[in-house]
Amino acid sequence: MKAVALKRYLPIANPESLLDVDLPRPAPQGRDLLVAVKAIAVNPVDTKVRAPKDKVEDTPRVLGWDAAGVVEAIGADVTGFKVGDQVFYAGDITRPGSNSEFQLVDERIVGHAPASLSVEQAAALPLTAITAWEALFERLRVPRKAEAASGKAPSILIIGGAGGVGSIAIQLAAKVAGLNVIATASRPESEKWVRELGAQQVINHFGDIPAQLKGIGFEQVDHVLILNDTDKHFPAAAQVIAPQGTIATIVENSAPLDVSLLKAKSAGFVWEFMFTRSMFQTPDMGEQGKLLNEIAALIDRGVLRTTLSKVLSPINAANLRQAHADLEGGRVIGKIVLKDF
Ligand SMILES: NC(=O)c1ccc[n+]([C@@H]2O[C@H](COP(=O)([O-])OP(=O)(O)OC[C@H]3O[C@@H](n4cnc5c(N)ncnc54)[C@H](OP(=O)(O)O)[C@@H]3O)[C@@H](O)[C@H]2O)c1
């Protein structure tokens, strides 16, 4: 089968950083699906795993953790899918990724693709939707709209609003949870994008966040979701979080964070890592398949929209190098997807 893989960890400008290779097609066992991959999305995790280092792989390593495709074959213990089903999923960071014509993935972390989307529109969603959903509804414990108390909508500050995760987090927070969403964006085009997705107020992540919030009438916010540069944004988040509120981040810090800043407010701090469930094979890993099905239903009902912003075709090393380079630039709006091998 065709695949794009690496053997050495090189800067993306090096033509050998990602290579077109031919690999044996795997066979499904147990709860695995064998999926014929039709479209893939790229994520910063791909560039972080690919980051230059001295290590050399004995066999080509396939990256990529976002796909939409069709079930080609199933393992003996699969119960939720049949051959021919259209699926979308992020996969498991400890296994080969989706940048190959066929991929094995555990059925518990797979969703049925939204019927109303094209394969490239569907591929844009899984990794970021799982991340945003788990961050909002499981880590921050934001109630869904139906469960929310009436009265003034609670507020959330989403730092890094126009990126892949922000683009779906804004929609979930505004349209599913009914929160007042204040998103950050630094350019006219990213500001326009986050407003279209449901952000009610927009401030700039390169400016003074507490001062800008005050300027638009918010002394404090009920929730903060940090989607970029935790080192820089944590102190501001601690300053603006409401007493007894919670801050969630999805981005690793490089220096220690001063959680004592949260003590007087009894404020909480929580991590979201969307690979936790598959990495540790937690008993509830099937929640990811369920939430992907809920995302698909929300898309098909017109509550949410895809976050796709750019399509490259075919899926090959040259196009993937381009997509990685774009992501490393830190200015992507929405999601870049590659389609067809
Ligand atoms: N823990 C997890 O499970 C998990 C899951 C997914 C992603 N992540 C991590 O989360 C981060 C974001 O992922 P993503 O896919 O959303 O990335 P992305 O799509 O590459 O994000 C690009 C956006 O980041 C914004 N941005 C750039 N510099 C910023 C800064 N200093 N502060 C705030 N925003 C800034 C830009 O907005 P402007 O153009 O408006 O400046 C741009 O639109 C990455 O580090 C990724 O590895 C973690």
Image: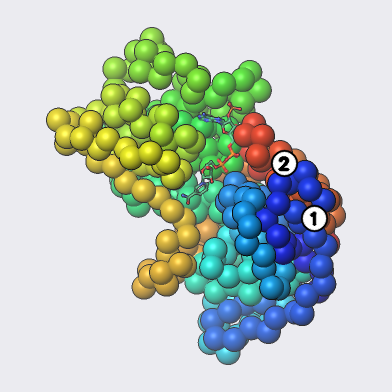
- Residue at horizontal 29 percent and vertical 29 percent from the top: 238
Please state, as top left, top right, bottom left or bottom right, where the C terminus lies in the image.
bottom right
Instruction: Tell me residue 205's x, y (percent).
Output: 49, 23
Distance from mark 2 CB to nearest ligand 1 atom below 8 Å? no
Instruction: Tell me residue 235's x, y (percent).
Output: 33, 28
Q: Horizontally, is 95 left or right of 253 in the view? A: right
Along the polypeptide, which appears first: circle 1 or circle 2? 1
Residue located beneath label 2 in the image: 325
Helix, strand, or loop for circle 1? loop
Give residue 16's mark: 1
Inspect the image, locate mark 1, and give the three-letter code of the amino acid beneath it: Glu
Helix, strand, or loop for circle 2? helix
Protein image colouring? rainbow
Circle 2: is it few (<14), some (14-19), or many (20+) Cα within 10 Å? some
Residue placed farthest to the left in the image?
Answer: 264
CB-based contact (under 8 Å), mark 1 and mark 2 = no
Instruction: Tell me residue 49's x, y (percent).
Output: 59, 55
Q: Nearer the viewer, mark 1 or mark 2?
A: 1
From the viewer's perspective, is residue 319 above or below residue 284?
above
From the viewer's perspective, is residue 333 above or below residue 269?
above
Circle 1: is it few (<14), some (14-19), or many (20+) Cα within 10 Å? some
Quarter of the displayed picture in which ligand 1 can be seen:
top right
Q: Is residue 320 visible?
A: yes
Q: How many marks?
A: 2
Q: Horizontally, is 220 left or right of 339 in the view? A: left
From the viewer's perspective, is residue 148 above or below residue 51?
above
Q: Is residue 294 visible?
A: no
Q: Horizontally, is 232 left or right of 56 in the view? A: left
Please state, as top left, top right, bottom left or bottom right, where the N terminus lies in the image.
bottom right
